[in-house]
Image: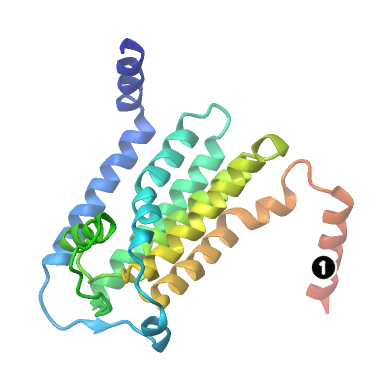
Amino acid sequence: MMILVEKIKQLLGHKKLMGLAKLSVLYYLVFFLLELREGKLNIIEVALDRRIPFCEYFILPYLLWFPYVAGCVIWLCLARDKEEEYLKLIRSLIVGMVVFVLFSLLYPNGQVLRPALAGENIFERLVIGLYRVDTPTNIFPSLHVFNSIVCCIAVCRNCEGERFRLLRAGTILLTLSIILATMFLKQHSTLDVLGAILLNMLCYRHYYEQEFLFRPGTDIQGVQRFRKVYRIREKG
């Protein structure tokens, strides 16, 4: 018990975590104010959304998103030799929050995909509870999707080797399940999902791609060939 208390004190005293916690509180405050705003909503929907059936069982991976993202952030923050990786993760998460808030502010949006539920089983009752606390407004891009992919990239990059093969596979499976859950629970349109994936691709290109090409341990001859080809094209 004392060890657990000491670990909690260590987390609460961690400057990087506390800074992120304050930023998260600010984000949720702004999000709450956006939710209170009244006025016309721009409905985000495509024909494919109506073809995707509702499936209440996806509530399980959807709810796992919360410990998944929190655990990934805490793990990288406390890791001794992961400072740069932690910063890449946090910067990507911040980009997602900022883009989401700005888009919601400038283009109020929502969806009308949710079905009427009778609460016939525990999974439907959980979905009904989710619907009560999370309105179908301000949905683009899906942060459930965006943050899941960001964390998946972080885990796969920092858990390399055969020893972590199952962990990487489980993380990818959980991420895919969360992405599907946003659509099968009628929380998001497929456009919200595609928007999140596109935003993640831009963040990955900005924060990871060049470093991936030229980080230590990379095939030096391959890098030299890449630079040579690039210079030739640049001159041409």
Q: Which residue is farthest top? A: 2
**Residue 85 in which image quadrant:** top right
What colour scheme was applied to this rendering of the protein? Answer: rainbow
> Looking at the picture, does residue 234 appear above or below residue 123?
below
* Residue 226 in the image, given as x and y percentages of width and height: 82, 62
Is residue 174 left or right of 3 when viewed as pictured? right
- Residue 222 appears at what percent x and percent y? 86, 55
Q: Residues within 10 Å of mark 1 (few under 14, many from 20)?
A: few
Q: Residue at position x 45%, y 66% from top?
A: 180
Q: What secondary structure is marked by label 1?
A: helix
Q: Which residue is mark 1?
A: 231
Q: Residue at 25%, 58% (x, y): give it.
A: 121
Q: Is residue 37 left or right of residue 64?
A: left
Q: Residue at x 62, y 42 (%)?
A: 166
Q: Quadrant of the C terminus?
A: bottom right
Where 90 falls versus 112 (above or below)? above
Numbered label tally: 1
- Extreme front residue here? 120
Examine the image and state in which quarter residue 178 appears: bottom left
Q: Nearer the viewer, residue 21 or 190?
A: 190
Q: Estimate the x, y position of residue 209 in percent, counting from the top left.
A: 64, 57
Residue for point 43% across, 84% down = 48
Nearer to us in this view, 170 or 86: 170
Quadrant containing the N terminus is top left
Q: Is residue 107 left or right of residue 3?
A: left
